[in-house]
Each structure stands twice: as structure tokens, then as C-alpha cells.
Image: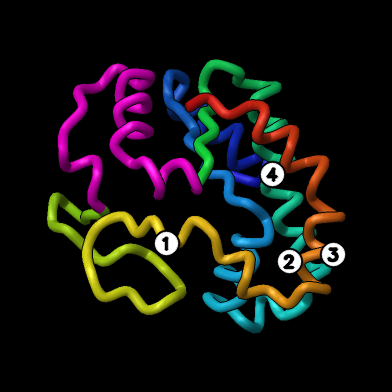
Amino acid sequence: MSDAANRATFFADYPDGYWISILRDPVSWYASAARHQPSEYADVEKAVGLWRASSQSVLDGVDRHPRQVIVVRFEDLVRSPASVMDRLARLLGIAFHAELLCPSFNGIPILADSSFDVDRHGVLPETADRAGMVPEDAADFIRRQTADLYDRVCALQTL
């Protein structure tokens, strides 16, 4: 919901709804995004602009709906899914079930959504850090352009 109009429509349609935003380290995010859609993210500067717009949208959402925007760090989710999902379930007021720990569609386990080869079901902790796959000059550029915003959104982390 990086678009303010979409965010407004969502909260108008679901006034008691929650927006759960997954925040990923921008360098690791870029490694995955560039592999997932090479033509879309070939230009690192443009990609960083998209990451910044999305992250700024989270800040704007928190300003407008502070109790309804939940920020979850991707790295925490994939490294400690049970802990994160238990806290998320409590925050949402729903019962925790083991099914929350496995990617699924209509209750049927599916492979993790990854731009890298996936050969098993479940959450893949090794996806937490892909920064080493980004050339050093690009990684340095991404860090310089995103550090301030990344720190601000991390500070909002709800879980």
C-alpha cells in the first residue's frame, strides 16, 4: 500500500483492519528483487527509490493509523517464525495455530515465495541475509541511500 489512495481505500473499507508491513534490510531486499524482476530492478538508483517510497509509505501509514499498522522485520520472521507469529496472533486477537508457520494457500502448504531456487516447504531462514550477493559498490550505495529511513522504520517495529 505504498500509494496513499490505496491506503485510504483500505482503511475506509476495513476501518478496524490491520496493515502488516514486512520490512527487509534494503541490500538483502535488492538481491532478491533484482533476481525476481531483473528488468524492473536493473537500475539500482531506481530500485532504491522504490524501496524508499514503500518504506516512507509505512511511516505515513503509522502517522495516520498508529494502532493499525504493524511492522515486522523480514529477518525476524524467517529466523524465528514461531515467536513472531505467536506475537502477531496475540496482537491481532486470534488464536495461534501451527498452520501460521508454513506458507500455504487455502490450507495447502506451498513452496516459499522466493526468487531463488526453493526445494522444500516452510519458512527458509537462509533467506534472511542475501546482502553478500550484491556487488559491494551497489551495496554501499544502497546503504547510504536507505540507512536513515531503514532505521526510522525499524524503530517502529511492533513485533
- Is the Cβ of the residue at disc 4 closer than 8 Å to that at disc 1? no
Residue 132 locus on image (x, y percent): 63, 70
Kind of residue sitting beneath label 1: Glu
Q: Which residue is mark 2?
A: 47
Q: Residue furthest bottom?
A: 39
User: On the image, which quarter does residue 155 sit in?
Assistant: top right
Q: CA distance from mark 4 to mark 1?
A: 23 Å
Kind of residue sitting beneath label 2: Ala
Q: Which residue is mark 4?
A: 55
Numbered disc in front, either 2 or 1:
1
Q: Which of disc 2 and disc 4 is earlier in sequence?
A: 2
**Magenta range:** 75-102
Q: CA distance from mark 2 to mark 1?
A: 23 Å
- Is the Cβ of the residue at disc 4 closer than 8 Å to that at disc 2? no
Q: CA distance from mark 4 to mark 2?
A: 12 Å
State the mark number for residue 126: 1
Residue 54 locus on image (x, y percent): 67, 48
Say which element carries label 3: helix
Residue drawn at (42%, 61%) of the image: 126
Q: Which residue is mark 3?
A: 141
Residue 154 locus on image (x, y percent): 65, 34
Residue 159 relative to residue 85: left or right: right
- Is the Cβ of the residue at disc 2 closer than 8 Å to that at disc 1? no
Q: Is residue 60 shown above or below 3?
A: above
Numbered disc in front, either 4 or 1:
1
